Amino acid sequence: MRLTHILLVAALLALCTLSPSQAIAQDAAQETTPPVPLSGAATYAENCAPCHGAAGMGDGPIASGLSVPPTALGDADEMATRSFQALFDVTKNGNMARMMPPWKNRLSDQQIWDTVGYAWSLHTTAAEADQGKAVYDANCAACHGQDGKASQAGVPSLADFAVTKDASQAAWAASVAAGKGAMPGFAGKLSDAEQAAALVYARTLSLGGPLFRPPLVAGTGVISGTITNRTTGAPLGDAEVQLGIFDETNQVESRSATTDA
């Protein structure tokens, strides 16, 4: 028996040893891993931006050729009714009635979560998240905790993605405005903008990373080395080069430079 056959049989036997409940538990555990929004920037740019647009406004370069307009992920009202779980499900399994292909065969569950996290961040701004933190600290942290981890019995954890992934911003907004259980309503105390900002910040507490990257600090640096003409063997001076600035594996900026002698 060839080695490939042995490996295939071993893999099949391993699958057969999992009961259905075990398999479901593994899938559920994988699907509830929190997204890291910035980690999804590259996969969004490659796979989603052609239709949904770089800023998520449904104006990507191929959007005009579709029979159904792509969802405007950067529109706050559009995103308000969609939970993270719903966004994950449609990204993974597709919705061909709206020209949305499934990505489960090209992206892992974690890549899909990260891409969804980045797509969700397109409807808000760093300024709104900062405003939301101030509102949250003043009005919510006393019960929900500074980190959202529910310091009191009976108060739901806002930092637990497995708990919060099924709730949309609109559902949260209704509870915050009118109150729910022991939580008072804030409709008469906070403006709509303040409530929305606080909910954006509250959502970030359950995500695996920051929504926004701080601006790059301007400065001067030197890259040392030699660029050589492989035909003549001579160094290339006065040559135009493109430099990429990366955050882990995601290119966040590019700059041009000219080599010296």
Image (cartoon, rainbow, N blue to C red):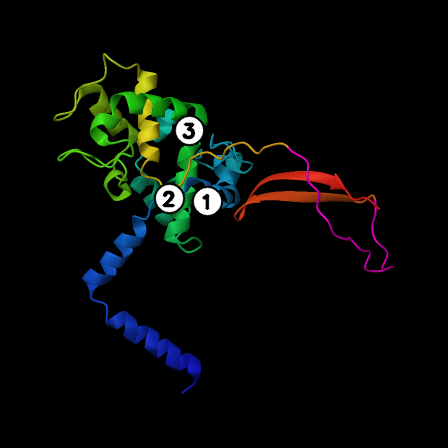
Is residue 187 at all visible to an observer of this figure?
yes
State the residue at coordinates (20%, 66%). Answer: 19
What is the residue that sits farthest to the top in this orientation? 188
Give the percent coordinates (x, y) of residue 210: 42, 37
Q: Nearer the viewer, mark 3 or mark 2?
A: 2
Quick one: label 1 or label 3, which is nearer the N terminus?
Answer: 1
- Is 185 placed left or right of 255 in the picture? left
Determine the CA span between mark 1 and mark 3.
17 Å
As drawn, the label of residue 123 is 3
Determine the CA span between mark 2 and mark 1.
8 Å
Q: Secondary structure at mark 3?
A: loop
Give the percent coordinates (x, y) of residue 162: 25, 44
Q: Which residue is mark 2?
A: 35
- Is 38 placed left or right of 143 in the picture? right
Q: Which residues are magenta?
A: 219-237
As drawn, the label of residue 39 is 1
State the residue at coordinates (56%, 36%). Answer: 61
Determine whether label 3 and label 2 are within 8 Å by CB: no
Q: Secondary structure at mark 1?
A: helix
Main SS type for the magenta part? loop
| Circle 2 crowding by C-alpha within 10 Å: few under 14, some 14–19, many from 20 | many
Q: Nearer the viewer, residue 243 or 225?
A: 225
| Amino acid type indicated by mark 1 | Ser
| Amino acid type indicated by mark 3 | His
Q: Nearer the viewer, residue 133 or 30?
A: 133
Determine whether label 2 and label 1 are within 8 Å by CB: yes
